[in-house]
Image (spheres, rainbow, N blue to C red):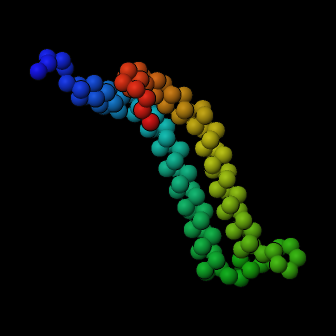
Amino acid sequence: MSTDTPASAPAESAAERYLAVQRSDEFAGLRRALRGFVFPMTVAFFLWYALYVILSAYARGFMGTKLFGSHINVALVFGLLQFVSTFLIAWLYSRYADRKIDPVADRIRAEIGEVTHEHGPRG
């Protein structure tokens, strides 16, 4: 029999550290920053998509309006703009994350890394 501390003790201290980080103001700010971008952008994209679907269902005359030549109409342009808006949102999120989210997340990860690297790599 040994009087050494059990192997689960470091895991408990790591778990406590994770809980402390989760309760920190810095982590709360990180979550607020993420939600501040994701929720409004999700609502905006959903409304844009719903507009496309509703117009396609109930405003067929408008959506069938020819814009260029005989095959390019409003519906096709709106459909292609769905792809454009998706890529635009991804690009905007990337820029937003680089400025507002990643620096805070890196600081938090570094703090947690001090605990996890003592007992081997995690990930």
Residue 92 vs 66, above or below: the answer is above
Residue 21 vs 63, above or below: the answer is above
Q: Quadrant of residue 11?
A: top left
82 or 105, which is in the foreground? 105
Could you tell me which residue is drawn at 60 percent across and 62 percent down? 48
Residue at the extreme top: 3
Quadrant, the N terminus? top left
Is there any visible trace of residue 81 in the rendered image?
yes
Q: Is residue 99 left or right of residue 70?
A: left
Residue 43 vs 9, above or below: the answer is below
Residue at the extreme right: 69
Quadrant, the C terminus? top left
Residue at the extreme front: 1
Q: How many marks on residues?
A: 0
Is there any visible trace of residue 20 in the rendered image?
no
Could you tell me which residue is drawn at 71 percent across and 82 percent down? 61
Position in image of residue 52 (x %, y %): 63, 70
Q: Quadrant of residue 119?
A: top left
Position in image of residue 8 (x %, y %): 23, 29
Could you tell me which residue is drawn at 67 percent across and 53 percent down? 87
Position in image of residue 101 (x %, y %): 53, 34
